[in-house]
Image (cartoon, rainbow, N blue to C red):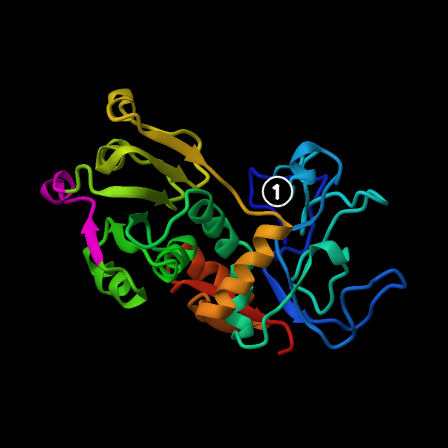
Amino acid sequence: MRPQPGHERPDIFPLVPGHEIVGEVVAVGGAVTGFRVGDPVCVGNIVDSCGVCEACRNGDQEFCAEFPTLTYGGRDRHDGSLTQGGFSDEYVADQAFVHRRPEGLDPAGTAPLMCAGITTWVPLRRWQVGPGQTVGVIGLGGLGHLAVKLAKALGAEVVGFTTSPGKAKDMLDLGADDVVVSTDAEAMAGQRGRFDFILDTVPRAHDLSPYLTALRFDRTLCTLGIVPELSFTPQTLRFGRKRLAGAGSGGITDTREMLDFCAAHDVTATVEVLPVAEVDAALDRLAAGDVRYRFVLDLTS
């Protein structure tokens, strides 16, 4: 992969991307105890961490004080080399960051669980989403569609927020109980005090005030989208003792818990599988928003 003009990073380019990986074990080192050749496995966006800081000791390796080693574009903690990602026919990783893949789940649909899935799973669990709660999910993309599926499987009433009326049916088909078109001011006004938890998956700047207003007393809105700044009217946060939080990815324990849950509830991503030769077409379609809801590249093709 080459950088786009204006975004040159000579320290990491060229590099091989890919951070949601499924496959099987083809070889193990002498110290490996948890896997054998032939085991179905998956690897996410983190492949190492310092292991000694408070976050790592608590199982939150994604918040490693020294920053975790990413699956691609990171620096190997042992030899300093650049990590190369999963758009390849093999990948070498520490067994601690390799996860057993549930055999009952579709491999292609399982791959996006390793980043999009765990990124939405962690806040849903942290704020104890479950039966009797009403949960809002803002956005219907790679993260949002999995958030809808996971929140529903956890037993919550799920309401999707979208700017596109045409996506309402998609959200309902994914399991949402209701859909609100966020560009409809009257519809948004009717959401005041409805939600126990709202998960914002939109990766672009937008006003959070209407969603903070939609929270019940003493409840939380968690943002996941990577945006340069957040915009909201402070009074919508103060009134009702609302909380605005953030999250990102997950550690080893959370990832394995998520995989077990998905296996028990048959939750996978909705994907389109393409041969690796069509990677350029996939990137072009991704840039155009023409994906429902995750592309998976078949590296065996």
Residue sitting farthest toward the left: 186
Q: Which of 278 and 64 is in front in this view?
A: 64
Q: Position of residue 268 (x, y in %)?
A: 46, 67
Q: Which of 61 and 210 is in front in this view?
A: 61
Q: Nearer the viewer, residue 97 or 22?
A: 97
Q: Quadrant of residue 223?
A: top left
Q: Position of residue 183 (x, y in %)?
A: 18, 44
Residue sitting farthest toward the right: 30
Horizontal side, residue 42 vs residue 165: left or right: right
Q: What residue type is labelled 1?
A: Glu
Q: Position of residue 86 (x, y in %)?
A: 66, 61
Q: Quadrant of residue 58?
A: top right
Rendered-image quadrant of the N terminus: bottom right
Give, as a single range, the part of the protein colored magenta: 178-190
Magenta stretch holds residue 136:
no
Q: Which residue is drawn at 20% across and 57% down?
A: 178
Horizontal side, residue 277 vs residue 170: left or right: right
Look at the picture and state if 283 lies above or below 67: below
Would you name the residue on which mark 1 appears? Answer: 62
